[in-house]
Amino acid sequence: MTSWEYAVNFFVALFALLDPIGNVPVFAAATAGGVAAGRRWVAAYISLFAFAFMSFFFFTGLSLLEFFGISLPAFRIAGGVILFLMGLEMARDDFTAMFADAAEGAEDAGPRAYARRRFERLIVPFAMPLLIGPGAISTVIIYASEAKALGLGGLATGVGVIAAVSVLTMICFWLTPLISKLLGRIGMTIIVRVLGLILCAMAVQFVIIGVADTARGVIIKTDVSAPYAAER
């Protein structure tokens, strides 16, 4: 896998998991009543938290697995199961309506003071586990193992992907009024369903690769665990 292929795969998986576009209605409901500047600060705080939290697991996740005696194939299979359940929930249910009742009136404070108070309320459950759940953490750790094979360039690429997804998340939340108006509820629902389907497919692929690593190619065919590799 080249650095470019690694970056694209990691970006797609992480962006689908965080689902910033699908979470726009949730963010809008959770920051209802706040002034525009305050909502932008909330989005910035959430995105900074996402970058720091995922970067921490990107660099320490493999060490944590070693400490607990968990093999990477076992973790890959477990992560695939979690991804599949989350993707299935996104594809079948109205995932974005989960925290629709989180709205509050405007707080009588400045934008940054409002943002700090609102961010403290949104760390759980919005930032975690809705935005950054077990699936996102599992994916970060799995792709951290892939980055080791690419050396320092792979690690830098991985951090760059995390930063890019975090920045795009912030931009999506900044554009909440525009995105909600352009897509409408039907458009938002379609996006969530499609991202859920993509997550389900990626989850199945994670499980296949984990089983293949465990069986050392005896049970799973190479062209199934690593599709399209032979064509290149």
Image (tube, rainbow, N blue to C red):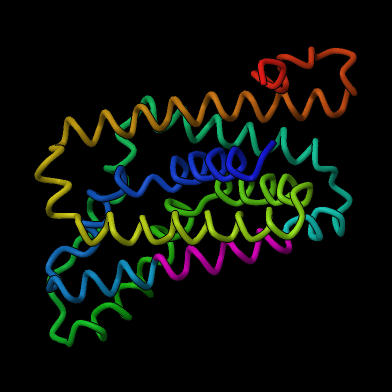
Question: Exactly how many numbered labels are in the figure?
Answer: 0
Q: Is residue 167 magenta?
A: no
Looking at the image, the residue that sits furthest to the left is 181
* In the rendered image, the vertical position of residue 79 relative to residue 178, given as above or below: above
Q: Residue at x 47, y 43 (%)?
A: 17
Q: Position of residue 84 (x, y in %)?
A: 55, 29
Is 52 colored magenta in this rendering? yes
Residue reaching furthest to the front? 232
**Residue 163, percent across and down?**
49, 61
Q: Nearer the viewer, residue 135 or 5?
A: 5
Q: Which residues are magenta?
A: 47-60
Image quarter for residue 74?
top right
Up-down relation of residue 95 to residue 222 (above or below): below
23 and 47: which is toward the camera: 47
Relative to 89, residue 108 above or below: below
For the point 40% across and 32% down, the residue is 195
Q: Residue 170 or 150: which is nearer the viewer?
A: 150
Q: Residue at x 67, y 40 (%)?
A: 2
In the rendered structure, the answer to whether residue 160 lies left or right of residue 180 reads right
Task: Name the side, left or right, on which 188 lies relative to 135.
Answer: left
Classify the position of the N terminus by image quarter: top right
Q: Position of residue 73 (x, y in %)?
A: 80, 36
Vertical comparison of 69 with 196: above or below: below
On the image, the x and y values in percent for residue 40 come to 24, 70
Quadrant where the C terminus is found in the figure: top right
